[in-house]
Amino acid sequence: MIRVLLVDDQRLVRAGFKSILDSEDDITVVAEAADGHESLEAAHEHQPDVVLMDIRMPGMDGLTATRHLLEDPALTGLKVVILTTFDLDEEVYGALRAGASGFLVKDTEPEELIHGVRVVARGDALLAPSITRRLISEFAGRVARPGPSPVLNRLTEREREVMSLVAAGLSNNEIAKELVLSPATAKTHVSRIMTKVDVRDRAQLVVLAYESGMVTPRWLTP
């Protein structure tokens, strides 16, 4: 059973999401919170697997709360999905940098919401929608960077190649096909890369690829 914590300052939004999620046999909403402070308390009390976090709330906002949750050693394994009204939101990008596993716009279809919770709960990043890659591409190029990140020196040439394909939005199966590997080998490469560069999931890996200059955002390409 996937345990979900809903965090949004609008009660109607929480009620709608709860109704959708609780209708599934493998998902249950264990708690709700109206702001960031409440989310921290609820996360400790109810130990959810996934937090659906509104990015803009009074008091402690979603970005700050996400950072606190993901830095808390007592909440290891917790996944955060950001809820937002706007797809190209710099604060959402900040949350991805902080370790959020992806984001959903609030008017998403019920099927996409359910799918997103399941994807993140099993340990994958919610990167399938092209909108996520567009968000990262939009804001990553604005981050000042002196040069390639030193952590990339830990990677082999093959691992760099795999990381570039992850940043391009390819799934493990697509990477396997592109590089003529087995899907299991592609998955192993991705896991090793995340361990070597010390990131939580594919979302952070994609952010690192852009910010290090390994991949150039399209809007910066001549």
Image (spheres, grey):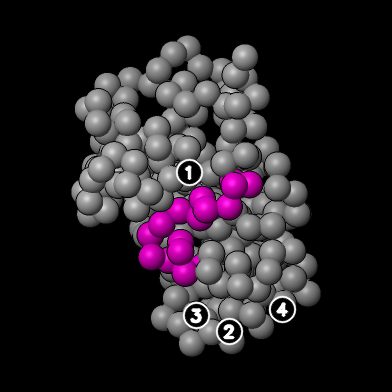
In the picture of the structure, the residue carrying the numbered disc 4 is 15
Residue type marked 1 = Gly
Q: CA distance from mark 4 to mark 3?
A: 15 Å
Q: Point out residue 79 in the picture as x, y percentages from the top left corner.
A: 46, 59
In the rendered image, the vertical position of residue 26 relative to residue 78, given as above or below: below
Q: Which mark sits nearer the N-terminus, 2 or 3?
A: 2
Q: Point out residue 219 in the picture as x, y percentages from the top left corner.
A: 65, 24
Residue type marked 4 = Ala
Residue nearer the viewer, 135 or 84? 135
Q: CA distance from mark 2 to mark 3?
A: 6 Å
Residue at 75% from the left image edge and 49% from the top image edge: 86
Q: Point out residue 181 in the picture as x, y percentages from the top left corner.
A: 23, 45
For disc 4, the neighbor class at 10 Å (few under 14, some 14 to 19, many from 20) is few
Residue nearer the viewer, 87 or 9? 87
Q: Point out residue 180 in the picture as x, y percentages from the top left corner.
A: 25, 43
Q: For the C terminus, give its image quadrant.
A: top right
Residue type marked 3 = Ile
In the picture of the structure, the residue carrying the numbered disc 1 is 169
Query: Which span is picked out in magenta?
Result: 117-132
53 with respect to 47 (left or right): right
Q: Nearer the viewer, mark 4 or mark 3?
A: 3
Q: Which mark sits nearer the N-terminus, 1 or 2?
A: 2
Q: Which mark sits nearer the N-terminus, 1 or 3?
A: 3
In the picture of the structure, the residue carrying the numbered disc 2 is 22
Q: Which mark sits nearer the N-terminus, 4 or 1?
A: 4
